[in-house]
Structures are given as structure tokens and as C-alpha cells.
């Protein structure tokens, strides 16, 4: 790492003790910026990188609510408004017991570069709560969302900060959050949240966008080699929103997804994962992926082991951060996997990313490969602003074009800065320079 950047990184470590995921996300970006500070010393003079590593605003709040048994429950809510140089803060809300300030900051930090790279006019932010939706009734989820929004509403707005979903927050939760925002403010402000239902201001393709976008990105990678997804063997981790629509698009394009997972274990189906079954299990019954075998007894369920042992041509980690480590990477490499694209945020550990680079495996980082979700959120904001509603075909075409643009920008930037073919360098540098230029232009704020 460049010496000037080591100082910035040390300051981040000192200011944010114990926030390991945040440190990891910052380290990964700073590691790529050496050639940028060498070529453009004015970024250092304007303290742009230092300022970028400090959120503009961090909000932490109490979320008390009453469960079905009449007991008072207490959770903690977060919203980190990281950077608004390019537009209103934009990024999802995550409801998961692992959520803490460090996790929200790593996600918010990644979001700055991802959103910049998407080419849409949106800043970076992220939020969430340590609330665990697992096993909670509809009524409990609704009351929690209402309690959460009772504080959050004063910090957000279509020109200020526009939350959306992430792990544990889908269409149902966005509905309850939007309902409470509308009730408190007495405003039908569609552009304040994205991921809304189609009947009340949502965009077609938003639900599918992250998974579809990741596969569009893989398609672009394969195109550079004169290949396509047709006949490829693919492993997808997770079975939530991102994984589901990644599986759907891979299948549509002629690939076979042989494995997917949840936090309990993974399923291997050599005939190809039956997506309707996965959706029924996860979206309707909200049950474990192990129940897949009730419908497909020929499949195999493996508990508590890494699904990256399953041989494949293409790996799509779509579950959560740091789910694919150095050992997993070694297994993928040994089995001849040649493309890894992150559908989740930072699912590959630094050791895994290093191993892929050394072995010549093409690696697409999440801030490029999974940017289709937030990009389609920006398309939802566009439709809301013009009180319009686009067709599925038109919206999907826009998404595909955006993913193509991100892919090409990663490659041309990597070339320009002396790391041809390196999508990590390309994504970090292209994402960074656009935000940095805006920050310089806007002055010391
Ligand atoms: N949570 C998603 C992400 O990680 C989407 C955020 C959004 O649509 O604002 O990018």
C-alpha cells in the first residue's frame, strides 16, 4: 500500500476500533488506489481519501416494540449516511442478528463506490438493525418495522436519504416501512424508499435486479473470452433474493445451477436446482433449504459444510460477507472454476481474492457485479420522479445496459492504471475517481 494511504488506513483503525469488516472494506479499496494518488496528487492535498473514510453522519437509535406475547423487545437501529457527493445517500437496510455499527459501515462504504460505478446520481449509505426476523409472526415484523421507522423517518427523504432492502428486508418489510413513513409524515413520498410493490410505486425488475445483474456481468466476462453461459456448471450460495434471481437468469441463459444453500447447509441437485421449489420453501413457507429433498429425493443435502467443495465452472457467492475463504478458494481452483462473481457484499475473504488472482481465476467484486440492485433502485426513483411506470422489457434492457457499462468501465480503468484484466482495481479506481472529483468540486464540506 502507498505510504500516504498507510497513514489514512492507520487513522481508520484508530478511529474505528474493533470494526473488522469496515477495516477490511477500507483496506481493499486503499490497496487499489496507489496508482491514483501517484497520478493525481491533488486528491491527497484535498484530503479526499481521508474524508471518504469518515461517514458524513452516523445515526444509532433504540427500537422498542411489543411481541405477540405482550413482552417488550428491544433492538438497535442504525443508519450510516456515508457520502452524498453524487446524490442522496442510497443503500439498503439489513435486519439480521449480526448487524452492528462495523457491519453497517462496511456496507455503507462499499455502497459509495458501487453507486458511483453504477453511473447513477446516488450517494452511499446503509442501515439496519440487529432484529432477527426468523420465527417472528407477520404482526411482529410489522410492529418492528413501524417502531424502526418511527425514528428513521426524520432522517430520510427523497432528496436526503433513500433506503431499500438488504438481507432480511424484502417487499413485505418495505411495505410496512413505507406505510409508517406515510402515516407519520402525511406525505405520499414515493421516492423515499425503493423496492416498493408494483401497485404502490415500485419498479418492475427491482426484485430480480441484483441476481439478474450479477449474471449479466458474468455474461460480459464470458463474452471477452468468446464464451457464453450455455452449458456452464454453476454453484450459487444462498437462497434469498439475490441467489434466487441469479439462479433464474443462469437457467434462462442455458447454464445449470447444481447447488445452493442457506445458513444450515447446502443442496446439490445434479439435474439442476428446481427454482420453483426453492421459492416455495423460502418465499412462501420461510423454511429451511433441507426440505428441498421432500420434493426432490434424488438430491443431496449436506449440513454444516462449505458448498464451495462442489465442482463448477462459475461460482456466484450470493449469501453474505466472508462466506468464501482461502480454503474454499483453493477447492474451487482445484476443480477448475474460472469465474467468481460476488452477488453478495464482500463474500470473499482477502485470502480468497488473492488466491483467485494468483491462479488466474477472473474475480468480479460485489461493488461491480451486484450493482444491478441499487442501479434499478435508481431507475425506480426516476420513475417515481416522473410519475411513470416502465415495462419489464424496457427496465431489464436498462439494467443490462448499466451492467455492460460497469463491466466496460472496470476493464478500461484497470487498463489505464496498469492492471489489465483486474476487475478489483478497475471497480475501486473508477468508483473512487468519480466521487473524488465531485468532492473536490464541492469544496471542504
Ligand atoms: N442492498 C442492496 C445493495 O447492497 C441494494 C440497495 C438499494 O437498492 O438501495 O446494493
Image (spheres, rainbow, N blue to C red):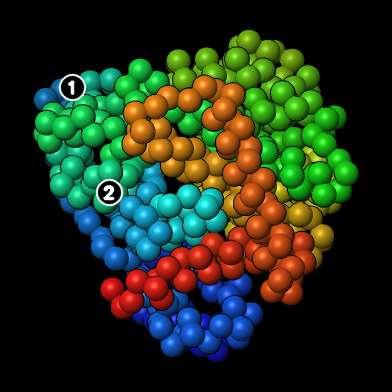
Q: Circle 2: is it few (<14), some (14-19), or many (20+) Cα within 10 Å?
A: few
Q: Circle 1: is it few (<14), some (14-19), or many (20+) Cα within 10 Å?
A: few
Of labels 1 and 2, earlier in sequence is 1
Residue 37: image location, x then y, percent: 56, 82
Q: Quadrant of the N terminus?
A: bottom right
Local SS, label 1: loop
Residue lying at 32% horizontally and 44% vertically, measured from the top left: 162
Residue 386: image location, x then y, percent: 36, 33
Residue lying at 64% horizontally and 80% vertically, measured from the top left: 35
Q: Is residue 363 visible?
A: yes
Q: Which residue is under mark 1?
A: 68
Residue 304: image location, x then y, percent: 59, 38
User: Alpha-carbon distance for marks 1 and 2?
Assistant: 36 Å
Q: Quarter-wise, where is residue 318 in the image?
A: top right
Using residue 240 as the reference point, say whether residue 336 is left or right of it. right
Residue lying at 38% horizontally and 38% vertically, measured from the top left: 381
Using residue 194 as the reference point, say whether residue 266 is left or right of it. right
Q: Is residue 264 visible?
A: no
Decide: is 26 above or below 47: above
Q: Quarter-wise, where is residue 211 in the image?
A: top right
Closer to us: mark 1 or mark 2?
2
Using residue 28 as the reference point, say whether residue 101 is left or right of it. left
Residue 5: image location, x then y, percent: 51, 82
Q: Which residue is under mark 2?
A: 159
Amino acid at each position: 500500500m502507498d505510504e500516504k494511504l498507510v497513514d489514512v488506513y492507520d487513522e481508520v483503525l484508530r478511529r474505528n476500533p474493533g470494526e473488522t469488516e469496515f477495516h477490511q472494506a477500507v483496506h481493499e479499496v486503499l490497496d487499489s488506489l496507489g496508482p491514483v494518488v501517484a497520478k493525481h496528487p491533488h486528491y491527497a492535498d484535498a484530503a479526499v481519501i481521508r474524508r471518504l473514510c469518515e461517514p458524513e453522519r452516523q445515526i444509532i437509535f433504540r427500537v422498542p416494540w411489543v411481541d405477540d406475547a405482550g413482552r417488550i423487545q428491544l433492538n438497535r437501529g442504525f443508519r450510516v449516511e456515508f457520502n452524498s457527493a453524487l446524490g442522496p445517500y442510497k443503500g439498503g437496510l439489513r435486519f439480521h442478528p449480526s448487524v452492528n455499527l462495523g457491519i453497517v459501515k462496511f456496507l455503507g462504504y462499499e455502497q459509495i463506490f458501487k453507486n458511483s460505478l453504477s453511473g447513477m446520481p446516488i450517494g452511499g449509505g446503509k442501515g439496519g438493525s440487529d432484529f432477527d426476523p426468523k420465527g417472528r409472526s407477520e404482526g411482529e415484523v410489522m410492529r418492528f418495522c413501524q417502531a424502526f421507522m418511527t425514528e428513521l423517518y426524520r432522517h430520510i427523504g427523497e432528496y436526503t436519504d433513500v433506503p431499500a432492502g438488504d438481507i432480511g428486508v424484502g417487499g413485505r418489510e418495505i411495505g410496512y416501512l413505507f406505510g409508517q413513513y406515510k402515516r407519520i409524515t402525511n406525505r405520499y413520498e414515493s421516492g423515499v424508499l425503493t423496492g416498493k410493490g408494483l401497485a404502490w410505486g415500485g419498479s418492475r425488475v427491482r426484485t430480480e435486479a441484483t441476481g439478474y445483474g450479477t449474471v449479466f456481468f458474468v455474461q460480459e466476462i464470458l463474452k471477452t473470452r468468446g464464451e457464453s453461459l450455455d452449458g456452464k456448471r454453476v454453484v450459487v450460495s444462498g437462497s434469498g433474493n439475490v441467489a434466487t434471481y441469479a439462479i433464474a437468469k443462469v437457467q434462462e441463459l442455458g447454464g445449470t445451477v447444481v447447488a445452493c444453500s442457506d445458513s444450515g447447509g447446502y443442496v446439490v441437485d445434479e439435474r439442476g436446482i428446481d427454482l420453483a421449489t426453492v421459492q416455495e420453501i423460502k418465499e412462501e413457507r420461510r423454511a429451511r433449504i433441507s426440505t428441498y429433498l421432500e420434493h426432490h429425493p434424488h438430491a443431496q443435502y449436506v449440513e454444516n459444510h462449505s458448498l464451495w467443495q462442489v465442482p463448477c465452472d462459475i461460482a456466484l457467492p450470493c449469501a453474505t460477507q466472508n462466506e468464501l475463504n482461502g480454503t474454499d478458494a483453493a477447492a474451487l481452483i482445484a476443480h477448475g472454476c474460472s469465474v467468481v462473481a460476488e452477488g453478495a457484499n464482500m463474500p470473499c475473504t482477502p485470502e480468497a481474492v488473492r488466491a483467485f488472482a494468483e491462479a488466474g481465476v477472473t474475480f468480479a467484486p460485489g461493488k461491480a457485479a451486484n450493482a444491478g440492485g441499487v442501479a434499478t433502485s435508481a431507475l425506480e426513483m426516476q420513475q417515481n420522479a416522473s410519475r411513470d411506470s416502465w415495462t419489464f422489457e424496457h427496465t431489464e434492457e436498462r439494467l443490462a445496459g448499466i451492467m455492460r457499462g460497469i463491466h466496460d468501465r472496470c476493464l478500461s480503468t484497470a487498463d489505464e492504471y496498469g492492471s489489465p484484466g483486474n476487475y478489483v482495481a478497475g471497480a475501486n479506481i473508477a468508483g473512487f475517481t468519480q466521487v473524488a472529483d465531485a468532492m473536490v468540486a464541492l469544496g471542504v464540506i
